[in-house]
């Protein structure tokens, strides 16, 4: 069974500050990993994903995440927060094998950006 | 621009009434997920279809919820009878095995049962 833990239901940063959203997973084998963003009254949209290859993954809107197998982590970062980054962020994992590819989502982290 | 389409976007209904939510997956996607989002539980997987066949609906209350795919372009989620605790946002998402679990989400149906 796989699970996802997002540390902190709310993260507050000032505009221009570093954004760090934490995600740890539990899986018998390293899974595929995803970050999604949800704006108010919208569905989730993909920010970035890790499947294979380079462990530092770049996504849209200046976000990136690094897969660290030894730490079972996939933290999301952005060097400088913008007001438009305020949203709900979800980390998700999907099994590497078995063929089902059912994503499991974390509880989400609300990013608050102060002027 | 390929996208998942859900209807209706909003639904207010009285307790005991039947509710049907519809989803048109992205053309060519053979995997459909139904999720429910609430403040208390976050995103819960209700059902999962591959090639129109239900592979996992263990997250769905069987006594009142049902999910079907009449054809490859339509997925439905039905609640009968509805209860106030069913109030939530229901999301449909689609994908393919090639997307390795990446789910393409619709904009959701916000259901309010009064």
Image: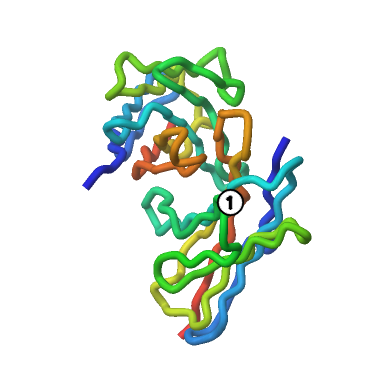
Residue that appears at 44% across and 18% down:
B67
- Answer with the quarter of the image where residue A47 lies: bottom left
Say how the picture is coloured.
rainbow
Q: Nearer the viewer, residue A65 or A21?
A: A65
Q: Output the chain of dot 1.
A: A
Q: Is residue B26 above or below residue B56?
A: below
- Answer with the quarter of the image where residue B25 lies: top left
Q: Is residue B14 left or right of residue A97?
A: left
Q: Is residue B43 above or below residue A73?
A: above
Q: Nearer the viewer, residue B19 or B49?
A: B49
Which residue, given by chain and number where applicable, does mark 1 sit on?
A33
Q: Residue B81, percent across and down? A: 46, 16
Residue that appears at 49% across and 17% down:
B54
Q: Is disc 1 placed on a helix, strand or loop?
A: strand
Crowd rating for badge 1 (residues with CA inside 10 Å; few <14, some 14–19, many 20+): many
Q: Residue A97, percent across and down? A: 63, 34
Q: Is residue A4 left or right of residue B102?
A: right
Q: Is residue B35 left or right of residue B12?
A: right
Residue farthest to the front, as pictured: A53
Residue that appears at 57% across and 62% down:
A54
Residue that appears at 55% across and 55% down:
A50
- Which quadrant is the N terminus of chain A positioned in? top right
Q: Residue B108, percent across and down? A: 37, 41
Q: Is residue A94 left or right of residue B30?
A: right
Marks counted in the figure total 1
């Amino acid at each position: 069974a796989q699970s996802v833990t997002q540390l902190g239901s709310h993260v507050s940063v000032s505009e221009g500050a570093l954004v760090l959203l934490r995600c740890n997973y539990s899986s018998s084998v390293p899974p595929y990993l995803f970050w999604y963003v949800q704006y108010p009254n919208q569905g989730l949209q993909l920010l970035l994903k890790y499947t294979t290859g380079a462990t530092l993954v770049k996504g849209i809107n200046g976000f990136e995440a690094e897969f660290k197998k030894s730490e079972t982590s996939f933290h999301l970062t952005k060097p400088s927060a913008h007001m438009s980054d305020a949203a709900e962020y979800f980390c998700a994992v999907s099994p590497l094998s078995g063929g089902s590819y059912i994503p499991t989502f974390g509880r989400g982290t609300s990013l608050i950006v102060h002027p | 621009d390929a996208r998942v389409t859900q209807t209706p976007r909003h639904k207010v209904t009285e307790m005991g009434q039947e509710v049907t939510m519809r989803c048109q997956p992205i053309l060519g996607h053979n995997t459909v997920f139904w999720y429910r989002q609430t403040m208390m539980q976050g995103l819960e997987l209700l059902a999962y279809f591959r090639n129109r066949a239900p592979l996992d609906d263990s997250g769905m209350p069987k006594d009142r919820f049902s999910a079907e795919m009449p054809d490859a372009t339509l997925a439905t989620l039905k609640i009968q009878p509805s209860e106030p605790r069913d109030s939530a946002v229901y999301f449909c998402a689609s994908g393919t095995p090639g997307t390795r679990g990446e789910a393409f989400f619709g904009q959701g149906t916000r259901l309010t049962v009064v």
